[in-house]
Amino acid sequence: MPDINRLKERFRKLFGEEQTRIFYSPGRVNLLGEHTDYNGGYVLPVALNVGTTVCVGIREDSRICLSATDLDEVVCADIDNLTAYRRIKWGNYQLGVAYELLKAGYKIGGCNMLFDDTVPHGAGLSSSAAIECATGIALIKVFNPDRELDRVELALLAQRAENQFVGVNCGIMDQFVSVMGKRDNAIFLNCKTLEYRYVPLNLGDYVLVITNTNKKRSLADSKYNERRRECERGLEMLKKELPDVTCLGDITVDMYEAVRGVIDDPIIEKRVRHVIYEDDRVLKAIEVLNKNDLKEFGKLMIASHESLRDLYEVTGKELDTLFEEALKVNGVLGTRMTGAGFGGCTVSIVHRSAVEDFRRLVGKNYTEKTGLVPDFYVMETDDGSREIS
């Protein structure tokens, strides 16, 4: 969270206004349930205590003017012609949200908006979703004061902005968690139905340590699309025996084991087996977290990484090295890759007293084995989109 008084002073110098309101939306990390979202399965993310803060003031004209604390420029757009700004270098995520709000019947007026982002860039912690959702809640609250905030609708609007206005084919998880996050809780989300519930995550003497491989993810997009096609092919094969299922998320472990022989391609079978068993791990995680059993939850995280490594094959040397080195540190309950893979980050549950050892030992050994220097982010859970008084 930035220094609010300093943010207001920066806003005043930039736009010459005193009357402002402040809104915030967090980034996120997924603790369990990887590559299940586009298969209609389950995920278990948390909102993090880093995010996007936006300072908003009303203008007298019909322009939205945007800037950020790490930018020198101001981007202004005419509300009546927002589609002309789809391809601008910065600001299209915010203007895409404004466009989708207008389409959905919300009122939008001219305003100045100054953004401050504390989500580490390039770490896969959903800085774009935080920007979108902070923009969305700000525009709804400022210009539609009598309209009750529908948080699920806000998440879907933000997703549409990224999909259709910006042109990035993301799922719903990032925006959903940014809007719906709850401190000391994970969110169990059914990506097919958007049914959700909060699951207690009482970390106590533990924290989340996110470790960035700092590897350029040149393979991520192509391999992601390849895995999606493999899962779709596996579903087609399984529907010969299970004609009523619509996605892999509909299939339980028992259902799968009864018909798995219908998949005659060993690669396809591995991909499908990961998804089915990963969904099952998320369901088991709900049970152990309701019992406040972090140790057992850590074991599920480890099993998830092993499945992503051996069955889904989306980890690679860098993520596997972080995984292996993390498990050597006393005080680590669980660790796994998080995100699309082929670079990006791991997330680990680490005792507070072991954080410095974790940084030192994992960092040293990772650099020796890969030649790369990792970044470490010590995080806690947080609430979702909100106004800051």
Image (cartoon, helix red, strand yellow):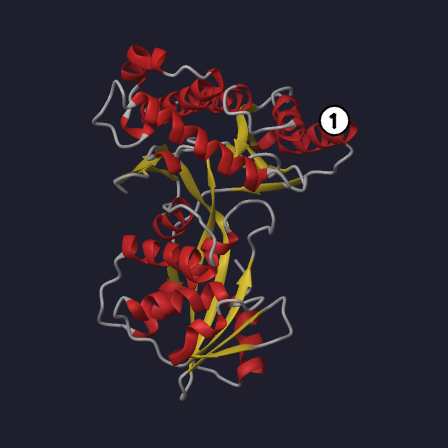
* Residue appearing at x 38%, y 80% in the figure: 80
* Residue appearing at x 62%, y 33% in the figure: 355
* Residue appearing at x 47%, y 15% in the figure: 266
Looking at the image, can residue 322 be seen? yes
Q: Position of residue 375 (x, y in %)?
A: 67, 41
Identify whether 96 is placed above or below 167: below
Give the labeled residue for mark 1: 365
Identify whether 330 is placed above or below 66: above
Q: Position of residue 339 (x, y in %)?
A: 51, 38
Q: Residues within 10 Å of mark 1 (few under 14, many from 20)?
A: some
Q: Position of residue 215 (x, y in %)?
A: 68, 39
Location of the C terminus (image quadrant): bottom left
* Residue appearing at x 51%, y 32% in the figure: 206
The foreground one among 31 and 243 is 243
Identify whether 153 is placed above or below 352: below
Is residue 224 rendered to the left or right of residue 327?
left
Q: Position of residue 155 (x, y in %)?
A: 34, 54
Identify whether 195 is placed above or below 176: above
Looking at the image, can residue 340 be seen? no
Is residue 267 rendered to the left or right of residue 322?
left
Furthest toward the bottom, the residue is 60
Q: How many marks?
A: 1
> Would you identify the image quadrant in which residue 344 lies?
top right
Q: Amino acid at mark 1?
A: Asn
**Is label 1 in a helix, a strand or a loop?**
helix
The foreground one among 78 and 187 is 78
> Would you identify the image quadrant in which residue 356 lies?
top right
Is residue 325 rendered to the left or right of residue 63?
right
